[in-house]
């Protein structure tokens, strides 16, 4: 080990402890950072001679490393048996999660809340267990509690304490989101992305929160709506739960007000898909909230003026930058105009008034989008043709998505069965042709009149990150099924899931977006060790994610054998921020 001294162009000097070695594969001498120390001018406030101090520290680390290289003998009896319920395997992959958890000040947040309540347990300890397990091994609260022994932490609380804590977590949802937002450095909120998803509950009775609505999974179960704001890096800013029967478009304005009021952001450009695109949202975003918007718009559902403009081929030009799924830039054409749109708005008193908004309409055609639209429709069209030939074989449920292409067909409102009519069902060719004329065309409506077409498209493309976040919450964090029933416990469950999403997104950003979140989670879940005896643990997993974590955080997972003391130091260092 040696003290690495780096002098930057700005005149500052940065110190770190590094390990020099020879890369046998490349045949060159190189080094890797073992411990980041900080800038020399800042360290001089704490040490009289930082360079001398850390040179000695590096020498001591080298001496210790040499001692640890000496062989040690451990004796095992081949006939030795495991005791009942023995589990000698522990996870160490939660170390970088712990680092981020403490960097965004969550330990202080929950400890401060614990001071105001009379409990014999620590809210922070329970929050850590729930968050780390939600990321690495999502399951019920009971199963999470039963697995608390796999971490190198002292979790001194009962299962009943876990359930009691959920009530307190639910009381601090807004405050926790604000705290996290304040502790994420260099967050860019000029452009924010907003979208909704829903989570279904397999229950018979509805309540104030779990209501029947339009399910993303096309289920009839009660659902909860979640609205989520993210910044342009894909880091969540805030979320809110709505009753399942809440219309998507009704959620933007109240949540944007809260974003401006509680999260200290200035003017933002809200990016959202067509479900949020209403005249009311466009008007109030720009006039009342002084924000901007970039909303998608399906041409098929647009006004006649927009449809005519789209089909009029004059004005289109070849887009000079192909999208990721376009192999040929010439297959993408684009044009735009600034259009004065007349809209009717209802104010808070219920009175309607007409007004005008000037917005930019960016319309484009993609040959790939055209092919995709036809491919997506193909199954429904094939089923519709079969329905026209054999209607008795279908009902309302089995004809989902296809019935609109069949004329002369009706369903019994109670049973869903197809009714016998005088006229024979026939496939609606005209309906198909009418839909096909819009294949490949799409539109974006925006208040940002001065931005170029290319800038608007690039801004809108960022919406994929929030869609990915919803996929992560449902697939990797397993937000549902929700194993609690009380509303405050449900609210607390989603807070834990939100914190977990923030942490894995920040980890992904720290790793320069080189790895997908599922791959990161899988790698950290596998980064475990087994107890050998004599306070020694055997590590048996390493990959490119653990190597990147070592380079970024200085957490080395690559030693095969570590003492319990060394492991505790690794965990302790993640809490020093």
Image: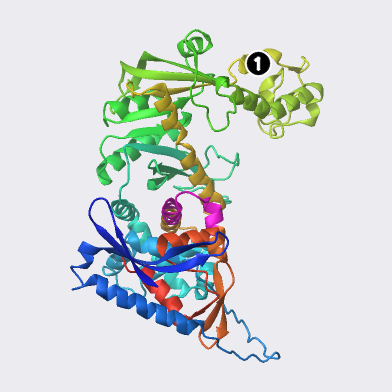
Classify residue 6 by image quadrant.
bottom left
Q: Quadrant of the C terminus?
A: bottom left
> Where's residue 420, x and y in %?
77, 22
Decide whether the magenta segment is chiefly helix, strand or loop.
helix
Depicted 99 relative to depicted 378: above or below? below
Depicted 19 relative to depicted 277: above or below? below
Depicted 9 relative to depicted 38: above or below? above
- Would you say residue 480 is visible in this rendering? no
- 513 in the magenta segment: yes
> Where's residue 356, x and y in %?
31, 15
Residue at (42, 42) in percent of width and height: 227
Q: Quadrant of the N terminus?
A: bottom left
Q: Residues within 10 Å of mark 1 (few under 14, many from 20)?
A: few
Classify residue 14 by image quadrant.
bottom left
- 528 in the magenta segment: no
Residue at (61, 22) in percent of width and height: 370
In this rendered view, identify the residue nearer to me: 348 or 54: 54
Q: Which residues are magenta?
A: 500-521
> Where's residue 561, x and y in %?
54, 78
- Secondary structure beneath disc 1? helix
- Residue at mark 1: 431
Q: Is residue 146 left or right of residue 20?
A: right
């Amino acid at each position: 080990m040696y003290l690495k001294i780096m002098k930057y162009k700005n005149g500052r000097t940065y110190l770190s402890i590094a390990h020099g070695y020879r890369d046998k594969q490349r045949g060159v001498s190189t080094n890797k950072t073992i411990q980041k120390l900080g800038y020399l001018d800042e360290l001089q406030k704490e040490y009289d001679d930082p360079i001398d101090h850390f040179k000695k520290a590096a020498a001591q680390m080298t001496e210790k490393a040499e001692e640890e290289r000496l062989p040690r003998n451990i004796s095992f009896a081949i006939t030795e048996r495991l005791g009942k319920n023995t589990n000698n395997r522990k996870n160490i992959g939660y170390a970088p999660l712990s680092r981020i958890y403490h960097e965004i000040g969550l330990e202080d947040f929950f400890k401060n809340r614990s001071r105001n309540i009379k409990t014999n347990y620590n809210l922070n300890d329970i929050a850590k267990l729930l968050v780390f397990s939600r990321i690495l091994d999502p399951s019920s609260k009971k199963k999470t509690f039963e697995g608390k022994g796999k971490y190198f932490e002292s979790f001194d609380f009962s299962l009943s304490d876990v359930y009691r804590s959920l009530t307190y977590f639910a009381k601090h949802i807004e405050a926790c989101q604000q705290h996290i937002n304040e502790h994420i450095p260099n967050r860019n909120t000029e452009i924010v992305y907003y979208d909704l998803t829903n989570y279904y509950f397999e229950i018979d009775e509805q309540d104030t929160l779990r209501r029947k609505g339009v399910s993303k999974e096309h289920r009839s179960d009660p659902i909860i709506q979640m609205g989520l704001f993210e910044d342009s890096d894909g880091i969540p800013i805030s979320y809110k739960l709505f009753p399942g029967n809440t219309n998507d478009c009704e959620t933007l304005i109240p949540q944007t007000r809260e974003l401006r009021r509680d999260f200290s952001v200035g003017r933002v450009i809200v990016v959202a898909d067509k479900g949020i695109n209403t005249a009311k949202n466009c008007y109030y975003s720009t006039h009342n909230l002084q924000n901007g918007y970039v909303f998608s718009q399906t041409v098929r559902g647009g006004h006649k003026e927009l449809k005519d403009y789209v089909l009029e081929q004059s004005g289109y030009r070849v887009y000079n930058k192909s999208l990721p799924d376009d192999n040929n830039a010439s297959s993408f054409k684009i044009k735009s105009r600034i259009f004065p749109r007349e809209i009717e708005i209802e104010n808070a008193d219920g009175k309607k008034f007409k007004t005008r908004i000037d917005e930019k309409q960016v319309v484009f055609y993609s040959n790939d989008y055209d092919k995709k639209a036809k491919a997506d429709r193909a199954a429904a069209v094939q089923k519709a043709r079969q329905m026209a030939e054999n209607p008795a074989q279908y009902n309302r449920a089995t004809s989902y998505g296809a019935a609109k292409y069949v004329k002369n067909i009706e369903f019994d409102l109670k049973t869903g069965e197809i009714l016998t009519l005088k006229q024979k069902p026939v496939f609606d060719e005209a309906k198909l042709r009418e839909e096909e004329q819009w294949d490949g065309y799409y539109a974006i409506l925006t208040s940002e009149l001065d931005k170029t077409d290319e800038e608007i498209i690039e801004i809108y493309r960022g919406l994929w990150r929030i869609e990915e976040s919803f996929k992560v919450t449902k697939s990797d964090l397993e937000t549902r099924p929700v194993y609690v029933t009380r509303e405050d416990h449900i609210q607390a469950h989603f807070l834990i899931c939100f914190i977990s999403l923030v942490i894995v997104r920040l980890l992904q950003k720290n790793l320069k977006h080189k790895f997908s979140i599922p791959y990161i989670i899988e790698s950290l879940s596998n980064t475990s060790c087994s107890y050998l005896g004599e306070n020694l643990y055997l590590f048996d997993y390493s990959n490119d994610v653990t190597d990147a974590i070592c380079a970024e955080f200085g957490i080395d997972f690559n030693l095969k054998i570590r003492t319990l003391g060394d492991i505790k130091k690794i965990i302790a260092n993640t809490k020093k921020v």
